[in-house]
Amino acid sequence: MSNVHKIAVATTSRDIHFFDVSTMNIFEEFHLYGLSDVPTCFGYWYNVKSPGECSLLLWGDDSGGINLLRFLKPNSGVFERTFTQQPGPHKIYMQDLKDHSSLLNYQAIPNVHPEAITKLQYIPEQELLITSAGSSTSSIVIMDIHQKGKVYTWNISKGVRCFDYSKTMNLLVTGGLDHKVRLWNKYVPSRPIAVLPEHTMAILDVAIYEPLRQIFSYSKDS
């Protein structure tokens, strides 16, 4: 969360800790607790040309849902501050987020996948969400953030552990437990453009390097 100089850290206790890193004296500023599910992955977006405009923190959870936290005026703060004499971070109960409506709003999209989400990405130009999971019947899902457009779903054996997307190259790259890196057109989930089977163990991550139009992947076999 570089525009507000913070780091968000989630735990299996169904909470998120927000650390202020604006100075060398790093400290926990806010503690959001009482989430309905365990966060499994994070994403964050803000307009680099106007960092004071609305920014978006999103996370996937272990029930296959997407959670969106929009910070409406990030320069004014991410949460309301209430006076307290207790030391430590400001504690915010998830059900009380409505009390912070002048600074944020929260949206939940449940049951996007039948199991935990492994990665998610927001495409601001088209307001799309891309998510992945280990499910073979719902491995990749691409949907409109407002849930109005068509939903595209990929069915890939053994699911998807990682992916990357390039709007410039119109390319979606996926990797998973079946050792294969697949290249896709994001509107054609029925068949990949190419399959790269060089790895002998599960793919841990993939990345598209647009300047050289290259794809990097790494797996447990190094």
Image (cartoon, grey):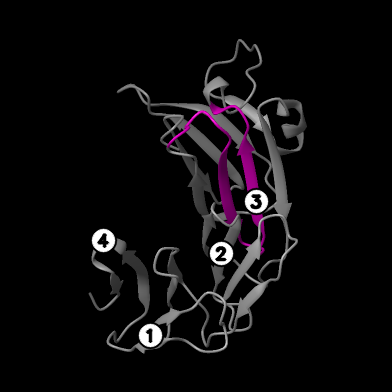
Relative to residue 159, is residue 27 drawn left or right? Answer: left
For the residues labelled 3 and 2, the Cα–Cα distance comes to 13 Å
Q: Is residue 53 above or below residue 168?
A: above
The first of marks 1 and 4 along the sequence is 1
Q: Which residue is mark 4?
A: 211
Residue 67 image label: 3
Is disc 2 placed on a helix, strand or loop? Answer: strand
Element carrying mark 1: loop
Q: Are marks 3 and 2 in contact (CB under 8 Å)?
A: no
* Mark 4 touches mark 2? (CB < 8 Å): no
The earlier-in-sequence mark between 3 and 2 is 3
Front of the two marks 1 and 4: 4
Give the CA distance from mark 1 to mark 3.
29 Å
Q: Circles 1 and 2: CB distance less than 8 Å?
A: no
Give the residue at mark 2.
Answer: 130
Label 4 SS? helix
Of badges 1 and 2, the one in the foreground is: 2
In this view, the mark in front (4 or 2): 4
Label 2 is placed on what type of residue? Ile
Q: Which residues are magenta?
A: 49-74
Quadrant location of the C terminus?
bottom left
- 4 or 2: tag closer to the N-terminus: 2
Graded by Cα atoms within 10 Å as few (under 14), some (14 to 19) or many (20 or more), the crowding at tag 3 reads some
Residue placed under numbered mark 1 in the picture: 180
Q: Tell me the amino acid under the disc marked 1.
A: Lys
Quarter of the figure with the N terminus: top left
Identify residue type, mark 3. Asn
Nearest to N terminus: mark 1 or mark 3: 3
Q: Nearer the viewer, mark 3 or mark 2?
A: 2
